[in-house]
Amino acid sequence: MFKPEQMVKLEIITLTRYRDPLLTYLHEKGVVHLEEVPIENIQRETPNEFYRKATSYSITISRLVDTLKSYLPPKSGGLKGFIFPRERSKRKYRYEGIEKLIKDVEEFLSEVEPKVRDVEASVTKINNEITNIRTAIEALEILSALNVELEYLRAGSFLNIEVGLLERDKVERAVKELEDVLSGRVFILRRDLGANSILVVVTLKEDSSKVASVLAKYGFERIEIPEGQGYPKDLIPRYLEKLEEKKKELEDAKRRGQKLAEKYYDDVVFYKELMDNERDKANYLSYLVRTEMTFGLLGWVPKGEVEKIVEGIKRITEGKVYMNISDPTPEEIENVPVKLKNPEFISQFEMLTEMYGVPKYNELDPTPIMAFTYSFFFGFMLTDFMYGLLLGIISALLVKGHSRLRDGTWRFAKIMLWASAFTMFLGILFGSYFGNALDMAGIHVPRLMDSMKQAMDVLMIALAIGLAHLFTGYLLGFIVRWKNNDKKGAIFEQLPWLFIIIGVTLFALSSRVGVPQIAFKAVFGIGLVLFAIGEILSNGAMALLLLISDFFGFVGNWLSYARLMALALATSGIALVVNIMVQMIWGFKIGPVPLGIIIGLVVFIGGHIFSTAINALGAFVHALRLHYVEFFGTFFSGEGRKFEPFAAKREVSELEIE
């Protein structure tokens, strides 16, 4: 806790024939962060034929997955399915090397791919035919206004015929220009259809280019004449019959697709996952170095996993391996991958830390502190027992439902479970139960403080909390810098703020507990002097300007904690508005029907659900901001390299390795 997982460097050299089984073993264990071996002018490993095929088949099978998925019936489940998702069963595959795996995949694809492609081609073809039929029907509906047989609307050996739509207000100008350009050698039939007009322009073939140029100028929308003979209105029923036939063909093709999906979808997803993992291994091959008979790799391993990994490597390589295990050197500290290490009950808060960044290997992990302060800030801003209870029930259900998956939803729900507990506790202290609903109902509620009536007191508490939070951050920064031999930074960048915060605290206490003024003046003065010296040492001639800027930056950060009070008031205020609305309509009746009670309950329940949601969102965001902007800036860089293990992603597959 507070320190990242201890890492060791693992260097391996072994025979080339063990490369594939060793990489597969490390990939399945998922505890080694592979690095590129830092040796120049040496041959690197490259993907062989089978790894290249794995990459190609991964893309091919992904397309099959998308195609078959489109034919599966929509999944039901809704809210229950979200809260209690079904765990996907895993299918085992006996791994005997990538060559055997590629052979199995090729056999599977030879059976499945032609069937899927055939259905896909049929569906695409039928959809195109349906589109063409619908386009023809639309054209026939428009052409029906002309009451002219279709054969007279098609061009002939000597005549060019253009049929289409033109905006009504442009028709006169277009007709006049056509007559001028063609010297009257044109016949035009016009029918007005609302804002547009349908035009039939008949000219000699030799004038077709002139006609096209003029019509294009006015935005003429050409209509393709559908196949068939007779009047357009008589052809429409025939095309509608064709449309129904094609729809039936499409349904038949989709049913074939659905049968294929039901039969092969799980298999396709299974083989896709196998290929995706082989492609992932191939992407790391360039990290390895090789000679004619051997290859070498470099990685970082959590110290607690070393013994098991070493034992496995010796077994895979039959003992024919050289391994060097060492702690990181001072020069390597900056680049050591960082894996956070916290007790199980607060480990979910690592998600919030990692959203900002991870600490460097020689820095402190803020997760343990954040687990408490984030939850406390969230509760302070939401500060209503019933809101916390609602949030807690939802979070508990999500934790229960996703406990086997251990996914992001599970981790987020556990964070909200902590936050809801603090919300309920602070709700009791502030006597808030759906705002002041109990007070309005005539029930006396004990409380230590009323956020609406004692807003200034709540503000003072919020600022005091902010001062303590910042003090903790600067103290941690001082410890980290001192421990990492940055004593100058510790004394002139962290220590001044500690003295300043202590001085401000003593000043606040002087009128209440009798602290002598000389005490807070002395402490505050020491802090200012150290702060000024630090600015001069760091910024030289710019020190005077930055002295003012940085000091008021600290003041701004401190005052930012006033949002604790502001959001607490917002929660109480919205709840109060809901309660007043309910009170106003509660006694409304129509005859003997107590309509006000019915509407009031709807408003009460809906209003407070809305209030819970909107205020919980505000509390979530602003509690994060107080950490990311104000708190982390005092000691935490977040510039470390996250531990990203060379690990297989297994949702539906499980390898059995020889």
Image (cartoon, grey):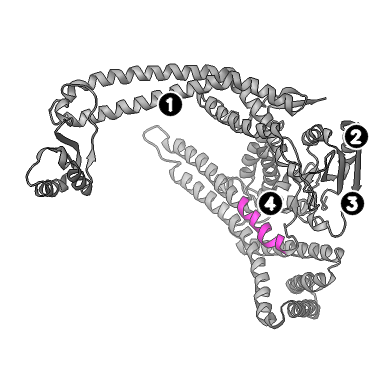
Q: Nearer the viewer, residue 34 or 395?
A: 34
Q: CA distance from mark 3 to mark 2?
A: 21 Å
Q: Amino acid at mark 4?
A: Leu
Q: Which mark is residue 327?
A: 3
Distance of label 3 from label 1 (alpha carbons): 60 Å
**Mark 4 vs 3: CB contact within 8 A:** no
Q: Is residue 626 magenta?
A: yes
Query: Vertically, is 53 above or below 346?
Result: above
Residue drawn at x 62%, y 30% is 57
Please state the horizontal and vertical placement of residue 623, each as a whole percent of the image: 65, 54
Front one among 604 and 229: 229
Q: Which residue shows up at 60% across the image and 61% down it?
A: 455
Instruction: Name which residue type carries label 2.
Output: Lys
Q: Which mark, by number, is residue 314? A: 2
Q: Earlier in the sequence, mark 3 or mark 2?
A: 2
Q: Which residues are magenta?
A: 619-633
Numbered disc in front, either 2 or 4: 2
- Residue indicated by mark 4: 429
- Earlier in the chain: of badge 2 and badge 1, it is 1
Determine the CA span between mark 2 and mark 4: 60 Å
Q: Point out residue 286 in the picture as x, y percentages from the top left corner.
A: 74, 44
Chain-order first, disc 4 or disc 3: 3
Q: CA distance from mark 4 to mark 3?
A: 50 Å
Residue 104, compared with residue 642, is above or below; it is above
Asked if the residue under mark 4 is in contact with the one under mark 1, i.e. CB atoms within 8 Å, the reply is no
